[in-house]
Amino acid sequence: MKQQQFENLYAERWNRFEVLLQEAELSRPLNPLELKEFAQLYRKVCHFHSLAKERRYSSYMVDKLGELIVRGHQQLYKRKTDYRQKMIQFFLADFPCLVRKEARFFWVATALFYVPALIYFIVVLLKPELVYGFLDPMTVIQLESMYNPENRLVGEAREAATNWHMFGFYIRNNISVAFNCFASGFVWCLGSIFFLVFNSLLLGSVSGHMVNVDYSETFFTFVIGHGSFELTAIVLSGAAGLKMGYALIAPGNYSRLEALKRAASIAIKLMFGVIAMLVIAAFIEAFWSSNNLFLAWQKYLVGAVLWAVVFIYLAFAGKQAELPDKTEFNP
């Protein structure tokens, strides 16, 4: 290929790289999509430079591309990794993209968590005494006292110190449940299945009993706000566990150990997102769900909005990052 043809085909790409490079050198932070584009173009410019040298193009072109590589390298490696930027990129795009990529495990975990809950909810409505299949009498009494509208233990405006104390308690409790769903999954998925179904039946039994004793408004106005983040996070932790367990069941062309390592690297990334969601859930539970200053319809409205936020985030966030790279170089 002659140099002029080469320039006509690919100059636009190294010119775009130079524009991004100049912006980075002026200390203008590149957004996550620009950072991804910058890294992709850097690799392409390196390839262009190698081809230009091999094909003995003019020294001007070789030197220009070489200079861009040196400057690009300085921008990529002159300082330590910007963890804040990586974190923003992960939560804005990488995490929801990963959830969608592992959708089959997510939907299996969703079915394991919600279907038994719905079934047992109906069973407890029809046979109230079956609530004791998962809850001991003392726990039932404590739940009734907690959600009894006359006691108003749930919903009263608490002191800030109490809210922060409960915030810490909820984080510890929620992460414990999620960790069980996740970590036990490597045993051929059995542990994740057990904990998903067990917590599902527990949710169904409590919900059914609250309806039976006519405490449904107090109960559901409390759980609907943080439930969007908390319950979805538990499902995702179960999906991460199923991902690891399935790697042992069907390792494909890899050894079981290698397949497990690869699956675990993905599952751990999912768990980073799960922990963030559980922290958000704990904050909402401590500072919003427990607040009695709002009417029931307001609680339901905010809860519906939060469920919509979680759905939209997981379904659509980072979609642009999944688009094929239109600047793909094919020499």
Image (spheres, rainbow, N blue to C red):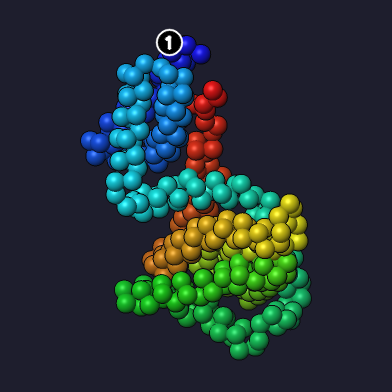
The count of marks equals 1
Quadrant position of the C terminus in the picture: top right
Would residue 49 be visible to someone looking at this image?
yes
Q: Position of residue 47 (x, y in %)?
A: 46, 29
At 55% across and 84% down in the image, what residue appears?
142
Q: Residue furthest bottom?
A: 138
Answer left or right for 127 relative to 166: right
Q: Position of residue 314 (x, y in %)?
A: 54, 48
Would residue 111 be visible to someone looking at this image?
no
Q: Position of residue 34 (x, y in %)?
A: 39, 36
Q: Residue furthest left?
A: 26
Secondary element at image label 1 = helix
At 27% across and 31% down in the image, what residue appears?
22
Mark 1 = which residue?
Answer: 4
Residue type indicated by callout 1: Gln
Answer with the quarter of the image where residue 56 lies: top left
Along the viewing direction, whichever of 270 and 52 lies nearer the viewer: 52
Q: Position of residue 285 (x, y in %)?
A: 45, 67
Answer left or right for 69 relative to 237: left
